[in-house]
Image: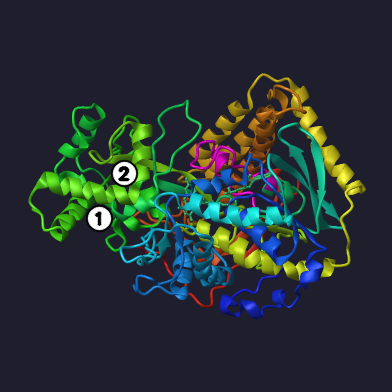
Amino acid sequence: MATLDSKIPQGKLADKWTNHKSHINLVSPANKRLIDVIVVGTGLAGASASATLAELGYNVKTFCFQDSPRRAHSIAAQGGINAAKNYQGDGDSTYRLFYDTIKGGDYRSRESNVHRLAEVSTNIIDQCVAQGVPFARDYGGLLDNRSFGGVLVSRTFYAKGQTGQQLLLGAYSAMNRQIGRGKIKMYNRHEMMDLVLVDGKARGIITRNLVDGKIERHGAHAVVIASGGYGNVFFLSTNAMGSNVSAGWKIHKKGAHFANPCFTQIHPTCIPVSGEHQSKLTLMSESLRNDGRIWVPKNIEDVKAIREGKLKPTEIAEEDRDYYLERRYPAFGNLVPRDVASRAAKERCDEGYGVNKTGEAVYLDFASAITRYGKEQAHVKGLDENDAALVKKLGQDVVRSKYGNLFQMYEKIVDQDPYETPMMIFPAVHYTMGGVWVDYNLMTSIPGCYAIGEANFSDHGANRLGASALMQGLADGYFVLPYTIGDYLADDIRTGTINTDSPEFEAAEKAVKDQIDAFINNKGSNTVDYYHRKLGKIMWNKCGMSRNATDLKEAMAEIKALREDFYKNVNVPGTAYEFNEQLAKAGRVADFLELGELFAKDALERTESCGGHFREESQTPEGEALRDDENFTFVSAWEYKGEPADAVLCKEELNYEEIEVKTRSYK
Ligand SMILES: Cc1cc2nc3c(=O)[nH]c(=O)nc-3n(C[C@H](O)[C@H](O)[C@H](O)COP(=O)(O)OP(=O)(O)OC[C@H]3O[C@@H](n4cnc5c(N)ncnc54)[C@H](O)[C@@H]3O)c2cc1C
């Protein structure tokens, strides 16, 4: 087992980061004009990085597979973005955000990076406000906050349930300005197919134009991967349908270590699966847990009656309801972190208390909040607090103003009115903490190749706290990468334009074309989705919310067999030189079929439970996750060696100097 000789300033906190040697090497404004940077991705991470790099003076080429950068998956982010502004005066601070994030990640993230993240979090809000992002404001006009899971302060900035959309519009506007100036060349509908290395350094990419199928070469002095997360390896997830691992996986195959692939976040509040026909799951934002109370009936007879349609949840008396999060975790209640809330829902459903037909749903109920807000409003307005109908109406108005679009979305999908009856929710795959391994400067183990946003593994350890992904993506894009990249690029000011006629580009392009031809000529009998769906089932059943050695070994063998069958029997209709969604998808599923196996291998090796990774063999008598700090306080960074099963584990040991490592408790 290898150990990473780390370029990482372990234990050095971020308030020292500006003095770190990475900032000694800078590129002058004049020399930046001589340097080209490729950015793959226009989600919040990629768009913010592209805009900032261009603003600094670099020549940027940005790629996305959608028809517009605005359609990146980031647009779906609902609930908010964290920052340690302490606007509520509730005791927040940089240290507290740093502490909450390390604890929330179950002590499996790097101290130095997380402190830097907490430190720059406040700048993000200022930056976005300056761009015109319409964050929610309170009565007096100041920026408002709400709470998210795993913390005891209110530090989440939000724009209704559309925070990602508004933030992306801000970053996209900044990008557009640079596109207008000619500093960013935007390539929509272009998919990165491979990375090109010259003399061991990242020097460009091969792309496929998704409209006409043309394969193109693009050179640059550095390549930044901002391609998002890989939750869709499970087929069903809350991610956008196009989210995939391919850019990250291609660079892994070229030498970038892939870290903690098994660290996946299963979000507790999603609309339950309704049947086999589905290809997408829908998140109900965690912000709803500010006011919604989670429960199942106490009595199994009530559960049966509900499932048979003989009883409504609103008919169950208060004393017959089990508010199991409030019961088990009195300190944090309904705002425990996602991994804890998801496991608790699974535990109740496994015991037979699930409230929908398949027994895989619990209630998220706003009745108490509606009454509480309604009474307050009646009091404020001098109206009758004992008029139940009036109180209900006033309370519903408040809830509508806070979560209206989320309630509307729920009603459209489920055809039930959540103002009148509790929502039904169940955990679903949502976010991947694992990803491409990066050092403190966000460089992968390939010189000149960087990874930012959800695509990298950094900052969230084994469990991400709500509203922290947008924070990390924008920290990476606006405030970290554009400055750390100079350390590497300072050596490139005399390199000149990268020649794409070199044998390295030739070979990479040929490999891409060969794979495309193989898919088109295969003429098998199964669709791409047939394989994706099967892979998803294996992942969910054997590598999902809880894992054990037997299942994980079976998963590895099953995924390998499925992959072999895929290459023999997949059918990709159409031709290579046209708009061909099935062809694009085939390449992405091929990569998922490799990642899935490494994912299971990583989960098998990590015999402890931590964060979202729950090994059944490692739990307390109360069923809580049991960490093994003595043997597993490290990042698993996997080195590619051909077959996923042959990947070599490199360990990056984690040292905690500023935070005391404790058992994580939300009781
Ligand atoms: C429903 C939902 C709600 C969420 N709500 C919140 C929230 O409230 N707060 C929070 O902090 N987080 C939230 N998250 C998480 C957060 O949205 C994501 O982690 C974050 O937006 C990821 O941003 P990104 O820039 O890294 O990637 P993405 O937004 O996924 O962007 C990826 C980009 O890469 C491009 N790309 C990918 N592969 C290729 C390729 N091969 N070639 C070319 N381009 C490629 C895509 O075109 C896209 O532009 C939510 C997630 C979901 C699923």
Residue 232 lies within the magenta run: yes
Give the x, y percent position of residue 1.
69, 59
Q: Is residue 40 left or right of residue 279?
A: right
Which residue corresponds to mark 1? 327
Which residue corresponds to mark 2? 348
Asked whether the viewer can see residue 6, the reply is no
Q: Is residue 357 left or right of residue 110?
A: left
- The amino acid sitting under disc 2 is Arg
> Label 1's element?
helix
Asked whether the viewer can see residue 274, the reply is yes
Give the x, y percent position of residue 124.
53, 65
User: Does 569 appear above or below 86?
Assistant: above
Q: Main secondary structure of the magenta part?
A: loop
Quadrant the C terminus occupies: bottom left
Q: Which residues are magenta?
A: 226-247
- Crowd around label 2: few <14 · some 14–19 · many ≥20 (10 Å): many
Q: Residue at x 50, y 67 (%)?
A: 126
Give the x, y percent position of residue 231.
55, 44
Q: Residue at x 42, y 61 (%)?
A: 157
The one of 604 and 494 positioned closer to us in this rendering: 494
Residue 141, image quadrant: bottom left
Residue 300, image quadrant: top left
Q: Residue at x 59, y 61 (%)?
A: 458
Residue 432 lies within the magenta run: no
Which residue is outermost to the front?
A: 180
User: Does 54 appear above or below 542?
Assistant: below
Measured Cα–Cα span from mark 1 to mark 2: 13 Å
